[in-house]
Amino acid sequence: WTAANDLAREGRWVWNDDDKQVLTSYWHHGEPNNYGNEDCAVLHNGKLYDFPCSHHLGYICE
Ligand SMILES: [Ca+2]
Ligand SMILES: [Ca+2]
């Protein structure tokens, strides 16, 4: 997991720590797609994917 999420407003991706918007270039092609309601972001091969927050995954700290 990363600290990026769109929990506050759907489609508005921000970083948890400073509320700055997530750059579009960080996303993998076709993401974020909010497939089945995905409000948290995982890092995979250097790109972000939105994913359901309820999944249990490892996380990255700054
Ligand atoms: Ca979402
Ligand atoms: Ca997704």
Image: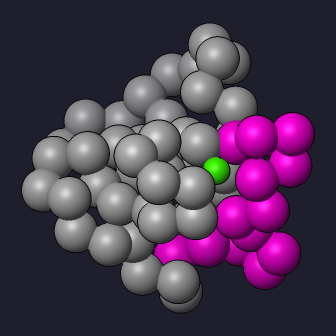
Residue 57 x/y as whole percent:
59, 20
In the displayed structure, does residue 29 sit left or right of residue 24? right
Q: Give the residue drawn at x 60%, y 27%.
A: 53
Task: Give the overall secondary structure of the magenta segment.
Answer: loop
Q: Give the residue drawn at x 61%, y 73%.
A: 27
Residue 9 x/y as whole percent:
47, 54
In the displayed structure, does residue 50 sit left or right of residue 22? right
In the displayed structure, does residue 43 sit left or right of residue 44? left
Total marks shown come to 0
**What is the span of residues highlighted in magenta in the rendered image?**
26-38
User: Can you tell which quarter of the image residue 3 is in?
Assistant: top left
- In front here: 40 or 25? 40
Residue 55 x/y as whole percent:
68, 18
What colour scheme does the image use? one colour
Q: Which image quadrant: the C terminus? A: top left
Residue at far front of view: 9
Residue 21 x/y as whole percent:
32, 72
